[in-house]
Amino acid sequence: MKLKIQVPFFIVGLILFSYGIAVAIKVKYLGVHPWDVLNIAFYDKFGLTIGTWNLIFGIMLVLVTLLINRTYVNIGTFINALMVGPMVDFFLWLDALPQPSTLMFDVLVLLLGVVVMGIGGGMYNAARIGSGPRDGFMLAISVKLGYSISKVRIIVESVVLVIALLLGGPVFIFTFIFTFIQSPIFQASYKVCTRWIEKLSSSINKKAISI
């Protein structure tokens, strides 16, 4: 019964997360998340699409995580890896996004992208169908090396950022503060959505029992 509630939250969360990435990419000169800097750098250097590189790196990380600790890989992880990239490409192609304008407006657009990504990330993680390929990878590394998750995140994203920078990716001020802005929004969304899922699941279970 609970799955009937979890799946919609998971899917809507992925859609919002993907839309937020696409919004941020529209004003990428201000700086985007390190992983998106990497996707954009590979797109500029080697072609394909930004979403395709998102998918490629996602699948690679899932495969590496399977070798390290398969506990952090399940069906939701694969769905995440396969869906987010194509949806980002779809939103960029659809172009139903705020267009770059003045610096102040562009900063607001980027913040909108960060907020939507944070809400979406909290939603799909609250569904507990599977963490994203990047989160699963960092959790597996954390357990393997005995480092804290925050330390692993800093190391991994720093390496990603250096590679992206060497390839000419769009690194600017917001790249360095992206996580600090997004994390509180993610946490709030995760807590609220977890409560909603539990409440809705409990309500459905009570109705099923009464029937």
Image (cartoon, grey):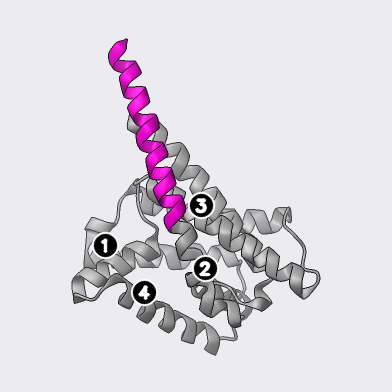
Q: CA distance from mark 2 to mark 1?
A: 30 Å
Sequence order check, earlier mark of 2 and 1: 1
> Is disc 4 placed on a helix, strand or loop?
helix
Pointer 3: what residue? 120
Considering every residue shown, the one lying at the far bottom of the view is 166
**Residue 33 shown in magenta:** no
User: Which of marks 2 and 4 precedes in the sequence?
Assistant: 4
Please rate how many residues cluster around mark 1, counting C-alpha atoms within 10 Å: few if below 14, some from 14 to 19, many from 20.
some
Q: Earlier in the sequence, mark 4 or mark 3?
A: 3
Q: Residue at x 53, y 89 (%)?
A: 166
- Quarter of the image with the C terminus is top left
Kind of residue at badge 4 = Arg
Query: Does the magenta-highlighted stretch encompass residue 210?
Result: yes
- Magenta highlight range: 187-211
Q: Position of residue 70 (x, y in %)?
A: 23, 59
Q: Nearer the viewer, mark 4 or mark 1?
A: 4
- Which residue reaches farthest right? 101
Main SS, magenta region, reads: helix
Is residue 21 at least partly visible in the picture?
no
The label on residue 153 is: 4
What is the spatial separation of the Cα atoms under label 4 and label 2, in whole angstroms?
15 Å
Residue occupied by mark 1: 66
Q: Is residue 74 visible?
A: yes
Element type at mark 3: helix
Q: Which mark is residue 181?
A: 2
